[in-house]
Amino acid sequence: MGLFVTFEGIEGSGKTTQIRLAGDYLGRRGIPFLITEEPGGTALGMRLRELLLNREPCAICPEAELLLFAAARAQHVCEVIAPALAAGKMVLCDRFADATVVYQGYARGLDMDAIAFLNSIAAAGRQPDLTLLFDLPVEAGLRRAQARIARLAGEPREDRFETEDLSFHIKVREGYLLLAHKNTERFRVIDAAGTVADLQEVVRFHLDRLLLAKS
């Protein structure tokens, strides 16, 4: 059985860059791995990603948003994550169930028990072996995210969450930090204000420790 590592953080935290570099590192070490993302990873997930992360073509209420993320995750686990883990790969996933707890629970204010129930079904009871949380002040993250969006001329902007007001993003960050405090055995909080190279050194340290513990 492989190892399941999730990368979490607020908008603009740099987790997507770090997950790609982590894959490069594992590849050089000859460790079989898979990089995937949520929502996404499957044909259904990519269709739902278009709806969930872009402001058009339709409005989505919080409850529908929760159910769409759950549907994308259920397909993702069934079609991609579970088979890769069964094949002995290290799966690096850009967001997973913790993101739903934070965005739809802490930030949107939906019922936490309902979210836990849906997550348990969608994830088939699967928990990450390690969660790397990239943390930095909300304002700094949003500046990075807006700069990224500005470079995407003619491409899907995936800016639906970035356009939420500041209080929403503050709740997201606080929710992540609270989850990390409650789950210290799984979470590692990384100061995302450092350089890309510095952050990658920390990521590699935690991946190496996980691999050593499971060897």
Image (cartoon, rainbow, N blue to C red):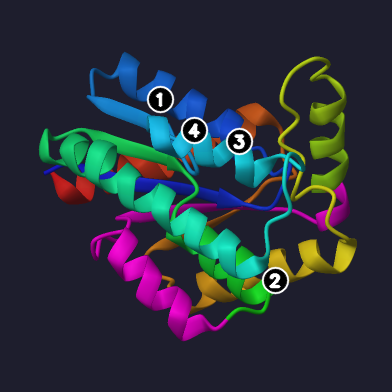
Instruction: Please state the horizontal and vertical placement of residue 171, each as a whole percent of the image.
Output: 74, 71
Which residue is labeled 2 in the image? Answer: 107
**Which label lies toward us, 3 or 2?**
3
Reply yes or no: does residue 97 show up in magenta: no
Which residue is labeled 1 in the image? Answer: 23
Residue type, label 1? Gly
Tell me: residue 141, above or below residue 105: above
Residue drawn at x 59%, y 60% is 65
Reply yes or no: does residue 120 show up in magenta: yes
> CA separation, marks 2 and 4?
24 Å
Q: Cβ–Cβ below 8 Å for labels 4 and 3?
A: yes
Residue drawn at x 36%, y 46% is 5
Q: How many marks?
A: 4
Question: Element under label 2?
Answer: helix
Please state which of residues 14 and 171 is positioned toward the viewer in this rendering.
Answer: 171
Question: Element under label 3?
Answer: helix
> CA separation, marks 4 and 1?
21 Å
Residue stretch in magenta: 111-140
Residue drawn at x 68%, y 46% is 192
Instruction: Please state the horizontal and vertical placement of residue 23, each as a whole percent of the image.
Output: 40, 25
> CA separation, marks 1 and 2?
30 Å
Question: Element under label 4?
Answer: helix
> CA separation, marks 3 and 1?
25 Å
Label 1 or label 2, whichever comes before in sequence order: 1
> CA separation, marks 3 and 2?
21 Å
> CA separation, marks 4 and 3?
6 Å
Quarter holding the C terminus?
top left
Residue type, label 3? Glu
Quarter holding the N terminus?
top left
Q: Quadrant of residue 42?
A: top left
Which residue is labeled 4 in the image? Answer: 46
